[in-house]
Image (cartoon, grey):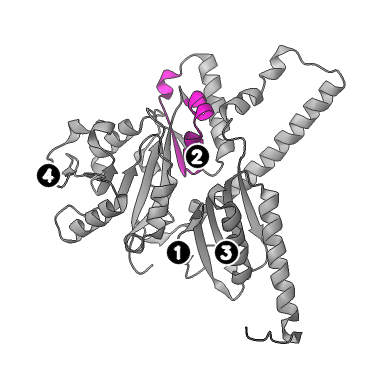
């Protein structure tokens, strides 16, 4: 990449899920003195105790050296102003940026802003989405609020908070069920426990396609397509397991009261009531694909189901540029400019795309892409024999 963009981490999570505490730890940690933090309002996240100075432009430098700034309306203007003031030497230089969203916020609009504003795209790059989940109230929150399910579904990293309050055996069992449900909802996201002895704040910042530390691109870690493939296999096993149980019941074989609770399936259905229609899956294409056909298929999907394409990531082997793979990244109907790589990251040159969708099945997406690519292939084979179409 010609310039080194500043990775942006979007910190989201439902009301009271522990974002303030997590931000506080980051702002206290000298290791992140090269970090800028943008929050909605200081009062909302309780950061007043960290303030060293408070300028008229609502930017403060914390004791650790972190830079903290409030959003005054438009996040786009805030980020452009912050970058300009850094270039002018008016604020300390920063290597990464964290944007904290309000608890009820849909993360998509901020992601869209980062992807579509040309002046931002030249300066910043989405590093990842970090979602905090309160282990105590998660079941009720996910069941009642569709926004919280979406925050989990689009996350690159899920941070469990308040697990120190989960002490008795029953609660610990519920916590394991919660982890399983979150992983089922978003298999590509790594789940970390804020109260775990091994928890390190650096785990929040290793989700970016571009790594500012090594000045390189890490596609495998960012895409994590294997997690989706493993999840699909496990999901198929679950369906088979459920079918066998139904078969047993049909023949009058009952396993007592414990049957309803043995694997948490009933609990899982309740906790993800809003998430029952969310699917996470990957598509793999063994052969190089036509850029025209792929773009056409993706445009069809966006035009008909754009709002339900919660997140799309991929690396593609394009037919006419087999040596230079392209990385794509989209949130709903908005896609970042494709990133062309100088070389393949490994020997596997298959195209891989991961999808997190709402109400769109893998079969639907696969059928669409297969049909369009097959049609394009057949047209390319017969094109020389066709008469040119008259100009309209």
Marks 4 and 2, how far apart at CA? 36 Å
Query: Residues in magenta?
Result: 138-166
Q: Residue 171 location in percent, x, y? A: 51, 17
Of badges 3 and 2, nearer the viewer stands 2
Instruction: Say which label, 4 or 2, has the lower sequence index.
Output: 4
Q: Is residue 318 toward the left or the right of residue 22 in the image?
A: right
Compared to 256, does 183 lie above or below?
below
Residue that carries the numbered disc 3 in the rendered image: 316
Camera-side residue of 282 and 205:
282
Question: N-terminal of the two: label 1 or label 2?
Answer: 2
> Looking at the rendering, in which quadrant would you find the C terminus?
bottom right
Cα separation between marks 3 and 1: 14 Å
Q: Identify the mark nearer the N-term, 3 or 2.
A: 2
On whether residue 141 falls in the magenta region, the answer is: yes
Identify the residue position indicated by label 2 in the image: 150
Element carrying mark 3: strand
Q: Quadrant of the N terminus?
A: bottom left
In the drawing, what numbered circle is on residue 337? Answer: 1
Residue 55 disc label: 4
Q: Earlier in the sequence, mark 4 or mark 3?
A: 4
């Amino acid at each position: 990449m010609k310039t080194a963009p500043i990775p942006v981490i979007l910190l989201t999570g439902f009301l009271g899920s522990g974002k303030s505490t997590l931000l506080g730890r980051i702002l206290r940690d000298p290791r992140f003195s090269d970090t800028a933090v943008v929050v909605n309002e200081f009062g909302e996240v309780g950061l007043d105790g960290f303030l060293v100075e408070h300028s008229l432009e609502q930017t403060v430098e914390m004791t650790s050296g972190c830079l903290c700034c409030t959003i005054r309306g438009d996040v786009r203007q805030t980020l452009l102003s912050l970058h300009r003031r850094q270039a002018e030497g008016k604020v300390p230089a920063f290597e990464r940026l964290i944007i904290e969203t309000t608890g009820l916020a849909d993360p998509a609009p901020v992601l869209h802003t980062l992807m579509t504003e040309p002046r931002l795209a030249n300066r910043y790059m989405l590093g990842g989405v970090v979602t905090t989940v309160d282990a105590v109230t998660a079941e009720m929150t996910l069941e009642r609020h569709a926004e919280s399910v979406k925050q989990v579904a689009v996350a690159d990293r899920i941070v469990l908070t308040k697990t120190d309050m989960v002490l008795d055996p029953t609660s610990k069992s519920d916590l394991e069920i919660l982890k399983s449900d979150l992983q089922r909802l978003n298999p590509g996201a790594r789940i970390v426990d804020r109260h775990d002895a091994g928890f390190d704040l650096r785990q929040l910042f290793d989700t970016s396609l571009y790594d500012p530390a090594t000045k390189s691109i890490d596609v495998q870690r960012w895409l994590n397509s294997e997690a989706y493939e493993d999840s699909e296999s496990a999901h198929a096993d679950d369906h088979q397991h459920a079918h066998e149980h139904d078969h047993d019941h049909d023949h009058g074989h009952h396993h007592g009261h414990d049957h309803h609770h043995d694997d948490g399936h009933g609990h899982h259905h309740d906790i993800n009531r809003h998430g029952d229609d969310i699917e996470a899956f990957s598509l793999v294409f063994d052969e190089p694909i036509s850029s025209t056909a792929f773009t056409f298929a993706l445009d069809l999907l966006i035009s008909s189901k754009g709002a339900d394409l919660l997140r799309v990531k991929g690396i593609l082997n394009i037919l006419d540029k087999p040596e230079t793979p392209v990385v794509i990244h989209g949130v709903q109907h908005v896609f970042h400019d494709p990133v062309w790589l100088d070389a393949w990251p490994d020997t596997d040159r298959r195209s891989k795309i991961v999808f997190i969708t709402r109400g769109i099945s893998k079969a639907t997406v696969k059928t669409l892409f297969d049909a369009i690519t097959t049609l394009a292939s057949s047209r390319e084979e017969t094109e020389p024999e066709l008469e040119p179409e008259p100009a309209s």
